[in-house]
Amino acid sequence: MAKTIENLEIEYQLAPTKKQKPNPNELGFGRIFTDHMFMMDYTEGIGWHDPRILPYQPITLDPSAKVLHYGQTVFEGLKAYLSQDDKILLFRPEKNMQRMNRSNDRMCIPPIDEKFALEALKSLLRVEKDWIPKAEGTSLYIRPFIISTEPFLGISPSISYHFMITLSPVGAYYKEGINPVKIAVEGEFVRAVKGGTGDAKTGGNYAASLKAQIAAKNRGYSEVLWLDGREKKYIEEVGSMNVFFKIGGEVVTPALNGSILDGITRNSIIELLKYWNVPVVERQISLEEVIQAYNDGKLEEAFGTGTAAVISPIGEFAWEGKKMIINDGKTGDLSKKLYDTLTGIQTGELPDPFGWRVVV
Ligand code: COI
């Protein structure tokens, strides 16, 4: 008999042995995984059931599982930090659970119980506390995700799913660390179109970005800047980050329009800027406007925001064989202040006037 989640009872199967912890200075991003993972299943007619924490291990899937053929899947990304007084801290985790349900809705995946999913995450973190790295710029990256498992080749929503959470100790997402990255403006391919899945966190968006990303990498750029899918004129986002420009004292970020990911770091940066009385607007902004601002000497800074990328200053944009070097390719004062403040709030080193931190 399947155990449903109503009574919040998570079954624990703990790993008999533990892996060796990695060198905190050589973490990179997303290649090392902890000893345990969380898993629960969904079955039509029953709902979500059998929540369990078990040793990190491969899972078996029927070769005809829907996720393998039609990509019916969603994921999230958030981080845990260890405070000086040894508490596990999360940053606005309820926002990730809410966004996961918005992605679920778009991908016809049954909703999760957001409160329960957060409790499950906290339980997993308590088991894996000694995996949270303490070195500056490191954290425990959390990857909740759902895959459709029904073995059926018909195009229809799956009747069964796995919800899983894995954990990965990480350092900086980009090899540049917090130094400025170089970004290539994508002129041929598009990431998302209005009415598509651009604002859902689903694997296909990222698979669709690979071709352009490889071409950009081969030319020495970290990622691509995506333009809108219709006119290839307006700025949308970078592969793993939302993007901000400081132009003539005002900070501008593309308004959410259905094809841009509603980033939690993006939202936090807007809130922080408002708190500091720095002018900030969410609006449509074209590449042409940014180039004009650059030519007029008004483009002061550019930076990306994301859970994995945190705040990544952008030192260069390249497009159609031309390039602009922003702030001499150096990290701008505002980008640095935002990075220091955001990470200070996240790690518990600074006060949290917004109530964003959640103690596990
Ligand atoms: C995150 O910032 O957590 C993301 O999901 C980006 C990821 C694709 C690395």
Image (tube, rainbow, N blue to C red):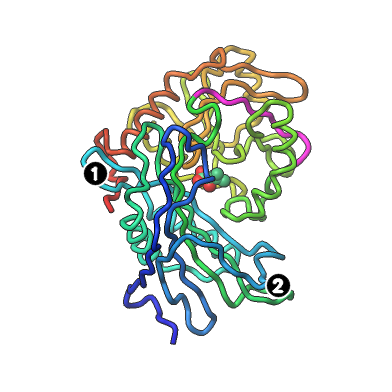
Magenta region: which residues?
A: 179-190
The residue positioned 70% from the left and 70% from the top of the image is 63
Mark 1 and mark 2 lie on one chain; the one further toward the N terminus is 2
- Kind of residue at disc 1: Asp
Disc number at residue 286?
Answer: none
Residue that lies at the very extreme toward the bottom in this rendered image: 1
- Residue 282 in percent (x, y) is at 51, 37
Disc 2 packing (10 Å; few <14; some 14–19; many ≥20): few
Q: Inspect the magenta stretch and tell me whether residue 350 lies in it.
A: no
Residue furthest to the left in view is 85
Which residue is disc 2 drawn over?
Answer: 64
- What's the amino acid at mark 2? Ser
Q: Residue, x 52% and y 71% (percent of image)?
A: 110
Find residue 274 and report its horizontal and vertical position in percent: 37, 33
Query: Residue 111 location in percent, x, y?
Result: 49, 68
Q: Which residue is mark 1?
A: 86
The residue at 55%/71% (across/down) is: 161
State whether residue 300 is above or below residue 162.
above
Which SS class for mark 1? loop
Q: Nearer the viewer, residue 165 or 283?
A: 165
- Residue at the location (31% across, 37% down)? 345
